[in-house]
Image: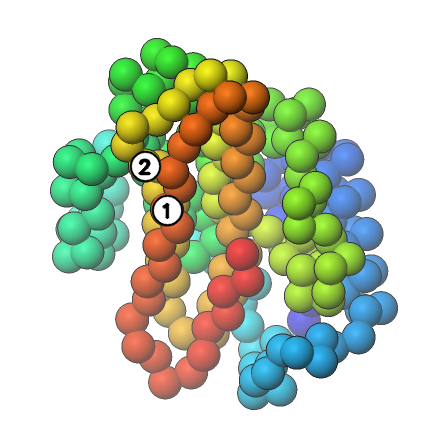
Amino acid sequence: MVSEYVVRSISEEHSEPEWMLRFRLRALKLFYELPEPAWLRGMDRLDLENIVFHSGPGTRVDSWEDLPEDLRRVYERLHIPEQEKEYLAGLSATLDSETVYSEVADRFREMGVVLEPMDVAVKKHPDTVRRYFGHIFPVAEHRYAALHYALWSGGVFVYVPPGVSLDLPLEAFLYISGELRGQFEHTLIVADRGSKLHFIEGCSTPTFRKPSFHNG
């Protein structure tokens, strides 16, 4: 059940500041107040009561080699480490509800490019995150936007300094590992004045008999 207890538990697990908890609770209230979007089809087949809203391996590493072997094999089968090495300026990997890996290439880091897990950015870059969080995609856009903001976990924060142009793309790769899982990752990109970047968001999941729910 989507409850205040669940929302507070997610916020507490990430040691969030008070303003983010208040944002989440306001979003939860809106989720219950807003009507079902008329344009959205198929949600009647998804029983939110059976969805696990927050799950993850509890692992965050700086190197693919440090991932548990079973998780590393998942990404290797999808050629994610190989793509990062050959084609990307940086990569963030979110598994279910948690970001397990986040890295930006050295030459882009030296330019001041930031690519970090969202839960880290909330505490490390509080003024920037608070200024732009929910700015482009408002919490009251519809009830599932509100649900996203109430339950968000995982995802990536990107900052590109003024005048910096990235000649390789950044990528966020999202993976749902099981049925009846909810994934509510949040991506926040701040491209400062005169900067340029190409951002890719890729999603993958095995085929399951029962649905999962991506809302990010």
x 60%, y 23%: residue: 125
Q: In which quarter of the image is the N terminus?
A: bottom right
Disc 2 residue crowd, few under 14, some 14–19, many 20+, Cα 10 Å: some
Please state the horizontal and vertical placement of residue 100, each as a whole percent of the image: 37, 42
Is 77 rendered above or below residue 159?
below
Q: Tell me the amino acid under the disc marked 2.
A: Pro
On the image, which quarter does residue 143 sit in?
bottom right
Instruction: Identify the image quadrant of residue 45.
Output: bottom right
Residue in the picture at 55% in, 31% down? 190
Q: Give residue 12's position: percent from left, percent from top.
A: 65, 42
- Give the number of the disc on residue 110: none
**Element type at mark 1:** strand
The residue under label 1 is which amino acid type?
Ile
Q: Name the residue under label 1.
A: 200
Which residue extends farthest top?
A: 110
Residue 101 shows in the view: no
Callout 1 crowding tier (Cα within 10 Å): few <14, some 14–19, many ≥20: few
Kindly identify which numbered label has been placed on residue 169.
2
